[in-house]
Image (cartoon, grey):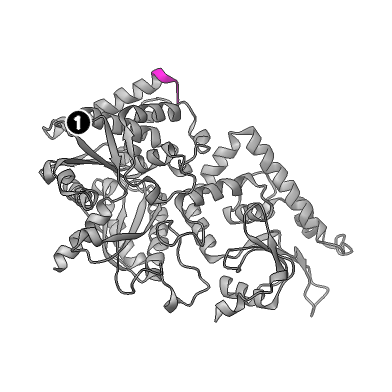
Amino acid sequence: MLSDILVLEQEAVEVLSVTGKRRGKEVDPRDIDLIEAQLGRRPKGVAEIVTRCPSGAPQVIKNIPVTFDEEDPQSPPRILPTLYWLTCPELLTAVARLEAEGMVSKLQEIIDKDPRLTERLQTAHARHARQRRELVTDTAWASRWPQQFTVISQTGVGGIRGSGIKCLHTHYADFLATGDNPVGELVHKELKLRGWLPCQEAGLGGSIPCFTQAKDEIQPDTEVEAGKLLAAGKVGTNSCRIVVTQGEPSRSQDLTVVADWSVESRIGAGVDETKSLSPEAVDRTIAALKQLLAQTEIWGAALVDLAGTGALREAANAEEFVDRVKAEVGVDLRIISGSEEARLSYAGATAKLPEEQRKEATVIDIGGGSTEIMGQQGELVLSLEVGAVRLTERWLGEGNGAYGDSSQWEELLTFATRAVEAALATQGQKLVPSSQVVGVGGTFTTLAAIRGEVRDYHRAKVEGMGLALEEFDQIGRRLFALPPEKRVNIPGLPPARADIITEGVAIALAVLQQLGADGVMVSTNDMLLGMILQAGKVKA
């Protein structure tokens, strides 16, 4: 059993203050066995277990940067420029998901625009080279193989020769090991916001079960009954999501969400203009689905439905994407209409409301490509082609700035209001006042997290939170005053949403004003819960 390997002697660990993990003083043979189980190969040249996860398993190791072939000492040395190596499979998966979303280029842009972060990164590269060089005590071989020695002594994190970002895994490992790497720090913040850090509360924080358990022993939560887990997924304009529930779907009050995972793959990038999915966006989304469904399989949850929305409804090559999902991911994806999306969102958002509130509720679901509005006990069903990604592309496409002063914020509000009014006019609809408004989707949950300064996102921390109309304007105005790369410092705002959040707020304000509402109740229950409820009705 892998868990037997975790019985390590107490004197072999000490507290590492930066990350709260435990640092190993020496390499135990049982650690080597566990690292082999983590990586799928026998590690060579492990100098130290630098950090451990709370379960005691290795998390980051320090590598000996140069090794020689004992059988052929005259052969060139083997050089490993990555001093700190991430071994935890859950962290490896989580960081890979960020990379699949294009986070390397996003973080590079953030670093390049901030001189202080640029200087910190250069310092980290230099420190990494110095620490690596200090491990090489015998340099007699350097004159014979100068190029290899240059890699050890002069390259930065991950062996990079410039000042850029090569791989998020290496920067994150460097941050966990030293506490001083700006790229790794931003990655850490993003993982915390998404609930992707290991060994947090299972499910609601987004964490998958610890790899140290055998697969048939994995339980998402001690209260989760095997065989009672259902999952539903969504491929939206901005992100892919999977929700896992426990309980009988025919009894909505007893149905509990035990996992909620998302990857912002932005398949709808550029679709408003080109009416086509780009190859890069398709590749990102396929990778995201593979990651999410792998977690679903680990949990043993049955996938009842996978729906495509927003951009997939209008992209000319959407069916080609559906075929790729079937061929490469192995699941069926169905593209649903805007009205079906609206009905599912209404069902999910109102499922746990008291009967009287449900009768009065109007639900707003702001997505990346569209906004759904449902009310009058399900009789009002609207899907407007106005979403956070779509509005951002239109706003910037007309030569407007991504940020600005209060007058420019007012211009964005006017722009959003006109877009909402035009979308309503095309459907011949006018919204009627509502006293009970429920907001679902990333815009509302992010605003709630910002308002509550939620640094470690957990759906329970924002569920049911009330936001007044003036708070939307205050938060939106504050965000719009900052360039997107500066917004990442605001607690509660995921970096991947920083460039579209202000447009999402503007849409929310426009719709709320149309409804004559003075605020909104935020709900994390949305169309995915509605899909599972619908599956229960069909089954029944």
Q: Tell me: residue 459, above or below residue 271.
A: below
Label 1: which secondary element: helix
Q: Amino acid at mark 1?
A: Leu
Q: Which residues are magenta?
A: 402-407
Whether residue 382 is visible, yes or no, is: no
Q: Residue furthest right?
A: 140
Residue tagged 1 = 515
Q: Residues within 10 Å of mark 1 (few under 14, many from 20)?
A: some
Q: Residue drawn 75% across and 48% down?
A: 127
Identify which residue, 250 or 35, lies in the foreground: 250
Name the magenta segment's main secondary structure.
loop
Task: Indicate the quadrant containing the N terminus: top left, top right, bottom left or bottom right.
Answer: bottom right
Task: Indicate the quadrant containing the C terminus: top left, top right, bottom left or bottom right.
Answer: bottom left
Give the image quarter of residue 202: bottom left
Q: Residue drawn 46% across and 67% down?
A: 209
Q: Is residue 457 magenta?
A: no
Give the left or right position of residue 290, taking residue 50 as reference: left
Q: Residue drawn 54% across and 61% down?
A: 92
Give the image quarter of residue 396: top left
Q: How many marks?
A: 1
Give the left or right position of residue 308, taking residue 57 as reference: left
Give the left or right position of residue 498, taking residue 309 as reference: right
Give the left or right position of residue 146, taking residue 236 as reference: right
Q: Tell me: residue 394, above or below residue 67.
A: above
